[in-house]
Image (cartoon, helix red, strand yellow):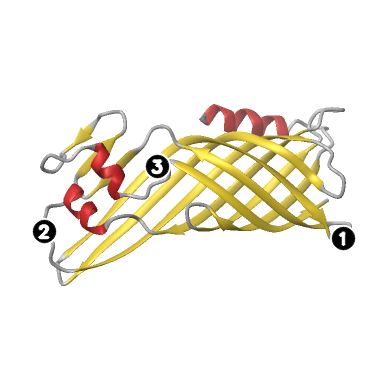
Amino acid sequence: MRGAFVAVACLAAVPGRAVDLSVGAFAGYQNGFGLSALGTAGSLIKNVPLGVDFGIGVTWLNPGDAALARAVFVNDATNGTAQTSGSVWDLRLDAVWFFHMSGLEQTGVFLGPRLSLFSGDFHYVGGNEDFTVTSNNWGVGAGVRGAIPLSRHWGLAVQAGLDWYPVITLYGHDSTYSSTGYSVNPKANYDFNAAYAAINQPHLVPSILVGVSWNQ
């Protein structure tokens, strides 16, 4: 998947190629409240409605079940009041196939690789415990998008998609659990299934985003 990022980026940078450029800013649902920015290069190949999207986003979410997370990654203690916070940064690169739809612009379907950087913080006030669970995973996503033109350059943009991260590895405290069956220092009789149940890391991520777009 890393190779896909490089290959499509190189295609967009071919000297002498006339491209249509646009940018967008979005907000909406991505397993939590999310913000994202998107840049698009279109008309990469003459007479072929192909483009490239590059996006970066951040989502704030509930990181998981605090009591179970503490048991899986630390110990079975129950003292203290849990305070939690979670976020996901994601990078995406998509090939976009544009098609015409009356009343819309920049309408297309997209497909490409994803990189998700999850972090969940668990702090137990009065329990003398504070740890972070992280997960950095590669995946793939697809969806549809389009914009209602508001002026010559500006539009009201909407996109819907679904991202999938097939392999998940969770790191927390001094323990590691992976969907491949690999683990390091698992606590008690806990395994990846317990860690997966405890943590709201990205796995199958639907998204519905609304924002504004600017076209060249």
Name the secondary structure under disc 3. strand
The residue lying at 49 percent from left, 40 percent from top is 115
- For disc 3, the marked residue is 136
Marks counted in the figure total: 3
Which of discs 3 and 2 lies nearer the camera? The answer is: 2
Toward which corner of the image does residue 50 lie, by quadrant?
top right
Nearer to the camera, 172 or 27: 27
Q: Position of residue 14 (x, y in %)?
A: 75, 30
Tell me which label, 1 or 3, sits earlier in the chain.
Answer: 3
Name the secondary structure under disc 2. loop
- For disc 2, the marked residue is 77
Tell me which label, 1 or 2, sits earlier in the chain.
Answer: 2
Name the secondary structure under disc 1. loop
- For disc 1, the marked residue is 151
Query: Is residue 212 shown left or right of residue 29?
Result: right
Q: Position of residue 210 (x, y in %)?
A: 66, 57
- Amino acid type, label 1: Ser
For label 1, the crowd category at 10 Å Cα-Cα, with few meaning under 14, some 14 to 19 and many 20 or more, is few
Toward which corner of the image does residue 213 lie, by quadrant?
bottom right
Return the mark for residue 78. Answer: none
Which of discs 1 and 2 lies nearer the camera? The answer is: 2
Q: Real-space Cα distance between discs 3 and 2? A: 28 Å
For label 3, the crowd category at 10 Å Cα-Cα, with few meaning under 14, some 14 to 19 and many 20 or more, is many
- Amino acid type, label 3: Asn
